[in-house]
Image (spheres, grey):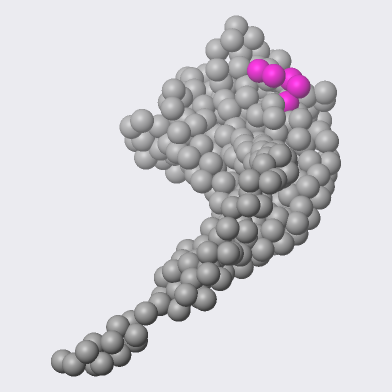
Amino acid sequence: MTDSEAASIISDLQIDSSDVDVKSKDIAKLNNWIKKNPKRIAVHVTCLFIYWSICLTFIILDGYQSSHPGSKIAAYIDGGGVTFSVFQIIICNLGMLITLIFGILFLIGGIRLVYQRFGLWVAIPFAIVWLGICAFLGTWQAWLWAVVRPIWTENFLNTACQGWNMSIMLAPYTINLEQSLPFLGVATVTLLNGSYSMQLEQNAANHYVLYFYTLNTTNAEPPISNITYNTFNMTYTIDNVTAHYAMSPNLAISSRGMQLVDPSIPFIGSGPPSANIEFKNGSRVLDTVTTLYSDCTQLKVCAIYDSVGDFEVALGIVMIQQFQYAQTC
C-alpha cells in the first residue's frame, strides 16, 4: 500500500469536527442552563411532585371508597355528594393537559439530545422507551384509578371474610326482571363444610310483602327456613311471630338485640347497602363487604352462623336493599 492510499483511507475515517462541535455546544448549553437555574428547576419539580401527590391521594381515596363501600371514608365521600368526583376531575383530569404538554416537550427534547449525542440507531430504541415514560408521567393521574379499583376490590373480596365462618353472595335479578318475577334474587351461603341458598320472592298481590326462604341445601341447613318481610310496616315474621325492625335513622333490629357497629355509616347511601351489625354485647353478626367490580348487582357479605338465625333476619333485610340498589347501579 502506497503512502497516498493510506492517507486516503485515514481521510475517509476522520470525524466531522463541525458535527462534534454542534453536539458539544448543545450539551454545554443544557449544562449551563441547569447550573444557572437551580432554584427555578427546584420550584418546578416541587410543584410537580405536590400536584402528583394530590392526584395520588385522590386515586387512593377513590379506590378505597370503591372497594370498601361500608367504610367510614366511603361514608364521608358519599356524604359530600358529587364534590369529591368534581374536584378529582378538575384537579387531575384537567390538570393533565398541563403535564401532557410538558411530557411532549420532554419527549422531543430527550430524543433530540440522544440523537445528536449518539446517532439515529441509538435514538430509535431510546425514543420507544422514552415515549412510554413520558406518556405515563404526563397522563397517569387521569387513568390510574381504573387500574387501582379492580385490584383493590378483588383483593378485598378474597380476604374480607377471614375470621368469619360464613361467606355469602347476594345476587339479585336485574336482567329480564319481568320474566323472573315474582322471584327477585338468590343468596348463596357458604360455610366450612357445606352450603345452601335462599331465594327472595315478592308477593304477587302486595309488593311490600317479600318471602326469604330456603331454595336448596348441600351438607348444611339454614337455621330459619322461611322469613316474611313487610317493607311498608317494617316487620318480619317467623313461625307466625311478628316483630319490627327500624330503618330510620338507621338500621336496627332491636327485637333481636342487633344494631350497627357505627351508626354514622348509613345503611342506605348512593352505593350498596352498608351494614356492619353486632349484638349489643359486642358479638359480631354480619358485615357487608363490597360488590363485584365487574357486576355491581352482586354483593358479598360475611356472617357468623348462629343456631337461632339472627344473622338470617339481618341478611334478608340486606338482600331486599341490595335488590333495590341493583336496579339502578
Which residue sits at x=54%, y=58%? 133
Q: Is residue 140 visible?
A: no
Find residue 201 and report its horizontal and vertical position in percent.
Answer: 64, 46
Which residue sits at x=66%, y=63%? 105
The quarter holding residue 78 reads: top right
Which residue sits at x=61%, y=57%? 30
Which residue sits at x=51%, y=46%? 151
Residue toward you, 86 or 121: 121
The answer to whether 15 is drawn above or below residue 218 in the figure is below
Residue toward you, 79 or 216: 79
Find residue 280 and report its horizontal and vertical position in percent.
Answer: 64, 9
The quarter holding residue 294 reads: bottom right
In the rendered structure, the answer to whether residue 20 lies left or right of residue 253 reads left
Q: Residue furthest left?
A: 1
Find residue 111 and report its horizontal and vertical position in percent.
Answer: 54, 68
Q: Bounds of the magenta span? A: 261-265
Q: Residue furthest top?
A: 281
Q: Quadrant of the N terminus?
A: bottom left
In the rendered structure, the answer to whether residue 166 lies left or right of residue 261 reads left
Residue toward you, 155 or 197: 155
Does the magenta stretch mainly form a helix, a strand or a loop?
loop
